[in-house]
Image (cartoon, grey):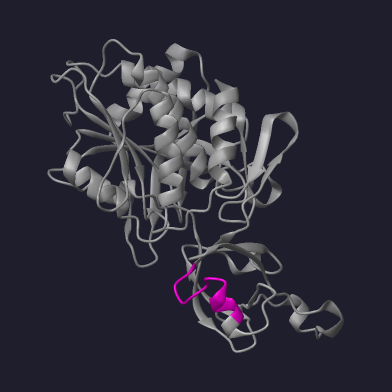
């Protein structure tokens, strides 16, 4: 299983898919589903949905992970060929300088880099300043606006971190958009499991769009599917490095996790306090499978589940995931063993949802 997960993850991380521009990622996932004998369908927003029909007397489930990644959008092409960008999603300024990027133009992908002022000309004050995104310049090597435009780059062109994958020691992997191509890789493996099952609830797998932009892509799928249960797969902040040690106990290689609390207060006032029946479900599934289940409770975190849970009369919700280091950086890190364990945990949990599974709040 781990070899398949790694193959899926590597392939997906190397495909650019800025939020709102996920088509290439969706096509690759759809092709991999087809090889597994699973049919997928795309909705108008670009979500990819695969439905596995099951016991109609059991609660239905929507399991989802987002395909999109954060990055930039071209906002101005200067006469000298240098490019100004707008940030799309939570790109940290401190992660931008001197990074390689890929501009996904109309005539193909164009490599570039975020300019960094020559060290020899940097003043003492500038050495300790972070360049704001408004002041960022992207250099593609072109020397005029006309040559940039001739290469297919226009206002609105998507820009992402240069896709890369690095194999690290101990089964760990670093790369672009681990968030949330790792979740998509887990879902592909879950699809293979579901394709061969005999019993269980109806499960809708949704590879969703727009999470990094407005957290609303999965909402459109939930509106159409109206599941009883929503399970979202995404990163959980690994707290096993010195800079994160006081944030929590989640550690890389420690197994999959569930979120008991998330909240984001900067203009959104949203988050997820999970349904107790689902917390119990995953705790029981972990015990049955002999898996360690890590727990997270964080502010400053928000996923699209926070909006999905409010669809219709309300959907029972739980965030599940894998520990990840260096979130929203050009290179993020996860552990393949955590992804494999998460896949097994989801399989056990889904199998335990039957006609007698109650979502009543008592």
Please check the rendered image and state whether residue 108 is part of the magenta-colored stretch, yes or no: no
Residue 283 appearing in the image: no
Counting every numbered tag in the picture gives 0
Q: Residue at x 29, y 10 (%)?
A: 198
Q: In this view, does 266 lie to the left or right of 146?
A: left
x, y (%) of residue 342?
48, 27
Q: Which residue lies furthest to the bottom in this view?
A: 79
x, y (%) of residue 109?
57, 61
The answer to which quarter of the image holds residue 199 is top left
Up-down relation of residue 96 to residue 274 (above or below): below
* Range drawn in magenta: 147-157
The quadrant of the rendering that contains the N terminus is top right
Q: Which residue lies furthest to the top in this view?
A: 198
x, y (%) of residue 97?
68, 69
Up-down relation of residue 360 to residue 262 (above or below): above
Residue 85 appearing in the image: yes
x, y (%) of residue 303?
38, 50
Q: Main secondary structure of the magenta part?
A: loop
Q: Which residue is drawn at 75% across and 82% down?
A: 126
Please check the rendered image and state whether residue 150 is part of the magenta-colored stretch, yes or no: yes
Q: Which of 312 and 34 is in front in this view?
A: 34
Q: In this view, does 160 lie to the left or right of 64?
A: right
């Amino acid at each position: 299983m781990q070899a398949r997960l790694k193959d899926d993850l590597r392939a997906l991380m190397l495909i650019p898919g800025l939020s709102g521009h996920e088509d290439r990622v969706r096509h690759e996932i759809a092709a991999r589903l087809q090889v597994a004998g699973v049919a997928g369908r795309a909705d108008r927003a670009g979500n990819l949905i695969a439905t596995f029909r099951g016991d109609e007397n059991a609660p239905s489930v929507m399991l989802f992970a987002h395909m999109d990644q954060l990055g930039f959008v071209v906002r101005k092409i200067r006469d000298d060929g240098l490019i100004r960008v707008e940030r799309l999603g939570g790109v940290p300024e401190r992660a931008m300088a001197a990074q390689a990027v890929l501009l996904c133009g109309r005539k193909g992908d164009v490599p570039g880099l975020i300019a960094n002022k020559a060290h020899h000309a940097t003043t003492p004050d500038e050495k300790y300043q972070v360049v704001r995104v408004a002041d960022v310049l992207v250099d593609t090597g072109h020397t005029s606006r006309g040559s940039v435009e001739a290469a297919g780059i226009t206002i609105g062109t998507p820009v992402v971190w240069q896709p890369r994958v690095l194999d690290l020691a101990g089964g760990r992997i670093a790369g672009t958009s681990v968030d949330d191509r790792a979740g998509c890789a887990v879902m592909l493996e879950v699809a293979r499991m579901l394709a061969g099952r005999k019993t269980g609830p109806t499960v809708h797998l949704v590879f969703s769009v727009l999470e990094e932009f407005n957290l609303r892509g999965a909402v459109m799928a939930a509106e159409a599917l109206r599941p009883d249960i929503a399970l979202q797969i995404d990163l959980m902040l690994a707290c096993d490095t010195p800079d994160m040690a006081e944030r929590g106990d989640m550690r890389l290689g420690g197994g999959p996790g569930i979120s008991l609390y998330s909240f984001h207060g900067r203009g959104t006032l949203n988050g997820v306090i999970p349904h107790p029946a689902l917390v119990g479900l995953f705790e029981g599934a972990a015990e049955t499978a002999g898996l360690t289940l890590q727990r997270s409770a964080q502010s400053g975190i928000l996923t699209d589940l926070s909006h999905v849970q409010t669809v219709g009369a309300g959907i029972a919700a739980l965030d599940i995931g894998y520990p990840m280091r260096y979130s929203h950086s050009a290179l993020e890190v996860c552990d393949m063993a955590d992804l494999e364990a998460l896949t097994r945990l989801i399989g056990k949990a889904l199998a335990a949802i039957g006609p007698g599974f109650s979502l009543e709040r008592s």
